[in-house]
Image (tube, helix red, strand yellow):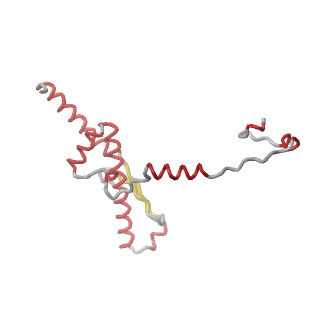
Amino acid sequence: MPSTRELIEQARAREAALSQVATLMADARGSAHALDGTVEVTVDALGALRRLWLAPSVIDADPLRLAALILEVTQLAMVEATQDCYNKVALQLGEDVTLLIEQLSGQPAPARSPDDDPGMTVEEFQRLRSERFARPTRRPSARSSAEDDAYFDNASPWSD
């Protein structure tokens, strides 16, 4: 059982660590852009808009459509900022504290989302790698000595 002094030190360490979270959140950034290239947004993990860029062509756009597009792009940027924040917190405070913050906030890291693309499986990577290396490579044909004098290739052992 920890002593009172140890409990106080643990509480102070946690308080110091959690005070860093606000700074890390303000430093975390997320950016996104519309597929058509008309809107670019950067936000921090606290939700503050840091940069909004609109293409000159939006002057002719429908205002309601443009507003909806800006909101959609901002939401995507916020997801990126949230993940960036959790990444920074995990590096600074460790995975356990980060998971605790996720649980306390009720907002899991976007990378833990069940609908997030998990990427390529190990098996799929190995299969594709095997297929790639199984392809026959072109070998240089045998050359005459006259061709050897005119040909030099650093990658070939017989071109010395």
Q: Nearer the viewer, residue 50 or 112?
A: 112
Residue 25: give x, y in percent of width and height.
31, 45
4 w.r.t. 56: above or below: above
Rendered residue at 39%/56% (across/down): 117
Rendered residue at 26%/44% (across/down): 99
Q: Left or right: where does residue 67 sit relative to residue 102?
A: right
- Res 144 quadrant in image: top right
- Number of marks in the image? 0
Rendered residue at 37%/64% (across/down): 70
Q: Left or right: where does residue 129 sit relative to residue 45?
A: right
Q: Left or right: where does residue 102 sit relative to residue 149?
A: left
Residue 14: give x, y in percent of width and height.
21, 35
Residue 55: give x, y in percent of width and height.
47, 64
Work out which quarter of the rendered image holds the N terminus and state it.
Answer: top left
Q: Nearer the viewer, residue 146 or 3?
A: 146
Q: Nearer the viewer, residue 84 or 19?
A: 84
105 w.r.t. 5: above or below: below
Q: Nearer the viewer, residue 125 or 107?
A: 125
Residue 130: give x, y in percent of width and height.
54, 49
Rendered residue at 30%/41% (across/down): 23
Work out which quarter of the rendered image holds the C terminus and state it.
Answer: top right
